Image: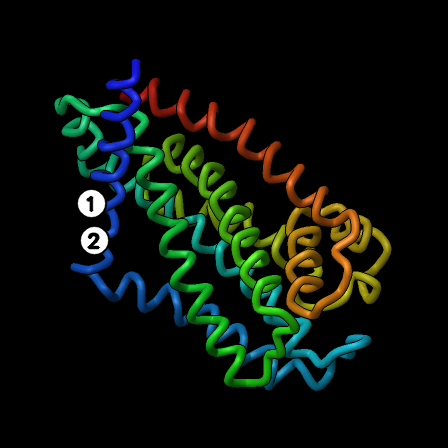
Amino acid sequence: MKNRFSYAIRDIIVMTKRNLLRYRRLPQLLVFSTIQPVMFVLLFVYVFGGAINVRGTNYVNFLLPGILVQTVLFGAMQAGVGLADDLSRGMIDRFRSLPMARSAVLAGRTITESIRNIFVVTLITLVGLVIGLHIDNLFNFLLAGALIVLFGFAFTWISAAIGLSVKNVETAQTVGFIWIFPIVFGSSIFVPVESMSKWVRRFAEHNPVTYTVNVVRALVLGRPVGDDLWYSLAWIACILLVFVPLAVNRYRKIA
């Protein structure tokens, strides 16, 4: 049993390295995944920021924590796209012929996207510092970063389940945007929920993205996190409990 577990860990590491090597050989994949969040930051700060009023801080400090959460959510879609690509090119069948743990394919893919998210979050933070982001406490910011990456990791499993279900790269990309856009824009990322219409506000207040953004924003600005932390962690736990088994089940049926 111990040997089987150690072999599975080894296989997961190998698959993670394999996925990371793709970014090394195709650096444009990483470059374009970082351009989009940078554009969001600059667009909202310098075009829309002057028209959006937030209490207690400037718009840069309000926006950047939300952009960091949005970045890992958009990055999570790549897990489903990557799995759909492997399916369409027959890579999953090749992995089946190897003496490797089947869990390595899914775990390696989701861990890869989490590592990529760490890089992108670091880059966006540097951009934020250049344009005026204020970090109240470095340790609290690191805690916020850990929560962001964990939140993104949970959503990679949703994306993985979708990618294994549709089995097509273009469809995985399209479906990914369909489910990610409502929860991103119907949240507190860009504007305070108090400014929204009643029914949108009700959705936004109970949105897992809003809970997570509120916690990250509080940690960055040195404010109390309140109950939002527990709601965010509860959402993360529920997503993992539902979508990890679902993705594994889809993978078993395909493979």
Q: Residues within 10 Å of mark 2 (few under 14, many from 20)?
A: few
Which image quarter: residue 232? top right
Give the amino acid at mark 1. Answer: Arg
Q: Is residue 73 above or below residue 191?
A: above
Of residue 49 and residue 150, the one placed in the foreground of this image is: 150
Is there CB contact under 8 Å for labels 1 and 2? yes
Which element is circle 1 on? Answer: helix
For the point 23% across and 32% down, the residue is 11
- Locate residue 193, reporting x and y percent: 78, 61
Q: Position of residue 173 (x, y in %)?
A: 40, 49
Find numbered disc 2 in the image and state the secondary structure of the residue it sits on. Answer: helix
What residue is pinned by disc 2?
22
Mark 1 crowdedness (10 Å alpha carbons): few <14, some 14-19, many ≥20: some
Percent from the top left, x then y, of residue 135? Answer: 61, 74
Q: Is residue 70 above or below residue 133?
A: above
Q: Amino acid at mark 2?
A: Arg
Above or below 255: residue 56: below
Q: Is residue 8 visible?
A: yes
In the image, taking residue 70 as reference, residue 113 lies left or right, namely left
Of 104 and 189, nearer the camera is 104
The mark lying in front, picked from 1 and 2, is: 1
Q: How is the image coloured?
A: rainbow
Q: Quadrant of the C terminus?
A: top left
Q: Is residue 175 left or right of residue 192?
A: left
- Residue 114 coordinates in the image, percent (x, y): 41, 49
Point out the image quarter for the N terminus. top left
* Quadrant in the picture for residue 85: top left
